[in-house]
Image: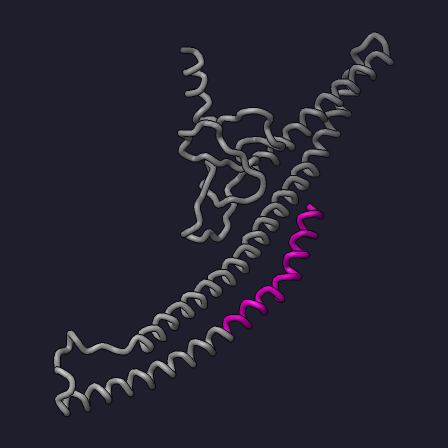
Amino acid sequence: MSSFVDEFQANLEALPNILQKKYSLLRDLDKSLQEIQRQNEQRCEQEIEDIKRGVKAGNITPNTSLIRFSDEALDEQKHSIRIADEKMALAVQAYDLVDAHIQQLDQFLKLCDVDNRRERDTAAAAPALLASSLDGSTKSGRGSESGRGGRKKTRLVAAEEATETEVAVATTFANTTGMQLDLPVDPNEPTYCFCNQVSYGDMIACDNPDCKIEWFHFGCVGLKEKVKGKWYCSDCAPLKNRRRGR
């Protein structure tokens, strides 16, 4: 958890400088665009006046299909469109950059909430476990033929119960971390896994080339580390086993 916080803080500290550079470039592009548009408007107005005078003087045939602006005017208009496209691309980059940090923060808050609930569940289960252990010790001490043997057996039972409780809590936490994250999803961003969420954290690909989902989050499929060799999701594994049986 601490490494995640350190990484997020480092990325967040660099965000203002990156945005400032993009906004500065946007301002420069906007100034260039305004200047080209101003020149193009003047050129087009002048050419329109020249065409009107030519038509009145009879030097130009009043055929609208043959009347057109000069190549210089058309080139200026194309250049304006290219600059506008560059401005749009920069704006989208800035938005995506901020949105990625927001999603990362939402994921961190969700993980913190899961961790806090796990700690509360563990703390709530501790008194019941202790009471059960003490009760078991009393009964074993009364019913055993040897006092030492009874205490030893009780400790083993208490240890087994404690282990079972820890496994149950760990399983609950593993299932919780695989829950769907209520993150703000870009409608254009692809989703994956059984949870139908965007890509985040560690993910694994199903080795079935015809898999409909393809990629899965570790937590959603119960993985903690990368699998050695081929791996198939729960939908594709039965199909793979059927082919082997044939």
Q: Residue at x 35, y 81 (%)?
A: 40
In the rendered view, does 150 fall on the left or right side of 210?
right
Q: Which residue is situated farthest in the front direction here? A: 59
Q: How many marks?
A: 0
Image coordinates for residue 27, horizontal then vertical, percent: 51, 75
Magenta segment includes 16: yes
Image coordinates for residue 72, horizontal then vertical, percent: 33, 77
Relative to residue 93, is residue 210 depicted above or below? above
Q: Which is nearer the eye, 95 or 151?
A: 95
Q: Residue at x 42, y 70 (%)?
A: 83
Magenta segment includes 152: no
Image coordinates for residue 214, horizontal then vertical, percent: 45, 34
Q: Which residue is situated farthest in the top direction here? A: 145
Q: Residue at x 42, y 30 (%)?
A: 211
In the rendered view, does 5 fall on the left or right side of 202?
right
Relative to residue 189, is residue 34 depicted above or below? below
Predominant secondary structure, magenta span: helix
Relative to residue 85, is residue 126 depicted above or below? above
Q: Residue at x 65, y 45 (%)?
A: 116
In the rendered view, does 71 fall on the left or right side of 195?
left
Where is the C terminus found, in terms of image quarters? top left
Where is the N terminus found, in terms of image quarters? top right
Q: Which is nearer the eye, 93 or 100?
A: 93
Image coordinates for residue 62, horizontal then vertical, percent: 12, 82
Q: Which is nearer the eye, 28 or 76?
A: 76
Quadrant of residue 71 within the rendered picture: bottom left
Quadrant of residue 239 within the rendered picture: top left
Scheme of image coloration: one colour
Magenta region: which residues?
1-27
